[in-house]
């Protein structure tokens, strides 16, 4: 297990150069256990989540297969338009139980129309700020540390990451840990229709990306972790009115049925008849009760299909789970209710600049927002309001404290809108 301290992404879609958290031993706060990204349509939220997906696919399947996934459409569509530099990722992380940050950087470029790993580096930063190079490759050739000695290495396939190949070998413990860590990331793109399919029976430990194996995971938890399953049922009963019981059942042709008993009906309903939101809430609860949770969970817009009053509670649960376990959770959302359960240290605002490149700012680093939150106004009230962009405050040339006279009224989305009263008269 490891903790992500920071990430830098270059030339990936609109993320021309984005840094989050702490990179290496530089100053800046490490990413917290719960990170939430908000911002207008097209500002780069899905691209950020896909950057994690891309990295993980590069590790599992090689860079060409990762670029050519249907949702990505090839290297040229992925590289920031107008740039001719490689797509670059820098991960800064800490293995649990160790204090030394480790930095992993790799660059992907296209040579003769084929995406390859241009370079790759794994460096451990010791307390004395000494940089211990564990792996350094240029187009598959370079050195890897075994014990304390660097050894020459030459990889056959320039489309595969060195950490994929070398991470299979126990003589490279740092590489094995990185490979295991990234391989274990869980990115959720829950699709209710996928969860409605009838998978073959067979218990499975972890939910897959789309939720297609929902029934298999239920089978596993029900069988091996009865008390966890009872907790899930209790939670779902509280949230989805009328649900009594959920069980698995095998169909005559060996497929797995999820049986939902509801108040007022004698016969059960099966997954095909259940609502999108019920299936989604059930999937998230299963994820939160995973007895062996992944080190990193990424979720795109969990609010879709869920009743808005459940969202703040769900966000609170994600947050508690992240803060009390070794799992880091990254979420993108359009929901002010979701954001309300979080602190400004856990929320980032994404926007595009005049070049169409994504800029990201932690809300805790926006002085006005920090002061307002400290004054007791909930975070949800702020983020839909167009009046709260730090540059505007700067443009007006006003010190933040002068803006602390506000008029509060109901906004279009049912959230509060807050407008400075004194800005025009000054
Ligand atoms: N290769 C590229 N170079 C630069 N920008 C790109 C590239 N590919 C896509 N984009 C930009 O990224 C945008 C899509 O970003 P993304 O899907 O991450 O937005 P989002 O914040 O998730 O939006 P929504 O809230 O609508 O889901 C596109 O509209 C386009 O402007
Ligand atoms: Mg999106």
Image: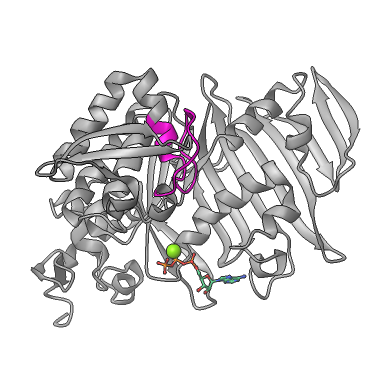
Residue 88 at x, y percent in the picture: 67, 54
Residue 145 seen in the current view: yes
Residue 16 at x, y percent in the picture: 59, 64
Residue 418, quarter of the rendered image: bottom left
What are the residue bounds of the magenta stretch?
196-218
Main secondary structure found in the magenta portion: loop
Residue shown at 44% from the left, 44% from the top: 198
Whether residue 197 appears in magenta in the rendering, the answer is: yes
Residue toward you, 323 or 230: 230
426 in relation to 154, above or below: below
Q: Is residue 207 left or right of residue 319?
A: right
Residue toward you, 375 or 7: 7
287 in relation to 291, above or below: below
Residue shown at 62% from the left, 61% from the top: 12
Residue 420 at x, y percent in the picture: 15, 72
Residue shown at 51% from the left, 19% from the top: 97
Given the current orientation, which residue lies at the most extreme bottom position? 425
Q: Is residue 137 left or right of residue 205?
A: right
Picture colour scheme: one colour
Residue 84, quarter of the rendered image: bottom right
Residue 111 at x, y percent in the picture: 85, 62
Residue shown at 41% from the left, 55% from the top: 193
């Amino acid at each position: 297990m490891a903790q992500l301290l920071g990430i830098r992404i270059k030339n990936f879609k609109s993320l021309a150069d984005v840094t989050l958290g702490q990179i290496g031993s530089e100053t800046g706060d490490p990413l917290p256990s719960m990170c939430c990204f908000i911002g207008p349509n097209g500002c780069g939220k899905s691209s950020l989540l896909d950057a994690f997906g891309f990295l993980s696919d590069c590790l599992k399947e090689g860079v060409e297969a990762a670029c050519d996934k249907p949702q990505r459409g090839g290297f040229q569509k992925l590289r920031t338009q107008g740039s001719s530099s490689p797509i670059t990722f820098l991960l800064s992380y800490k293995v649990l139980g160790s204090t030394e940050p480790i930095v992993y950087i790799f660059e992907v470029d296209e040579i003769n129309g084929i995406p390859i790993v241009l370079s790759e580096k794994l460096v451990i930063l010791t307390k004395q700020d000494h940089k211990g190079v564990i792996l350094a490759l240029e187009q598959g050739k370079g050195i890897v540390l075994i014990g304390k000695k660097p050894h020459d290495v030459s990889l056959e396939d320039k489309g595969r990451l060195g950490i994929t190949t070398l991470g299979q070998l126990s003589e490279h413990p740092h590489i094995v840990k990185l490979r295991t860590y990234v391989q274990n990331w869980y990115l959720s793109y829950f699709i209710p229709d996928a969860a409605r399919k009838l998978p073959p029976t067979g218990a499975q430990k972890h939910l897959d990306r789309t939720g297609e194996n929902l029934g298999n995971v239920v089978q596993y938890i029900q069988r091996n972790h009865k008390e966890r399953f009872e907790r899930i049922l209790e939670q779902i009963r509280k949230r989805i009115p009328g649900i009594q019981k959920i069980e698995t059942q095998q169909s005559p042709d060996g497929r797995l049925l999820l049986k939902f008993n509801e108040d007022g009906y004698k016969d059960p309903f099966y997954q095909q008849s259940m609502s999108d939101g019920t299936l989604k809430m059930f999937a998230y609860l299963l994820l939160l009760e995973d007895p062996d949770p992944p080190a990193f969970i990424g979720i795109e817009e969990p609010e879709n299909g869920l009743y808005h009053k459940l969202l703040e509670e769900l966000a609170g649960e994600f947050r508690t789970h992240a803060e009390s376990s070794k799992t880091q959770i990254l979420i993108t959302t359009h929901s002010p209710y979701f954001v309300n359960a979080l602190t400004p240290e856990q929320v980032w605002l994404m926007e595009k600049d005049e070049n169409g490149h994504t800029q990201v700012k932690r809300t805790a680093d926006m002085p006005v927002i920090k002061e307002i939150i400290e004054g007791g106004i909930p975070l949800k009230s702020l983020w839909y309001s167009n009046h709260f962009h730090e540059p505007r405050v700067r443009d007006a040339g006003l010190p933040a404290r002068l803006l602390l006279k506000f008029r509060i009224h109901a906004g279009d989305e049912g959230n509060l809108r807050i407008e400075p009263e004194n800005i025009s008269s000054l």
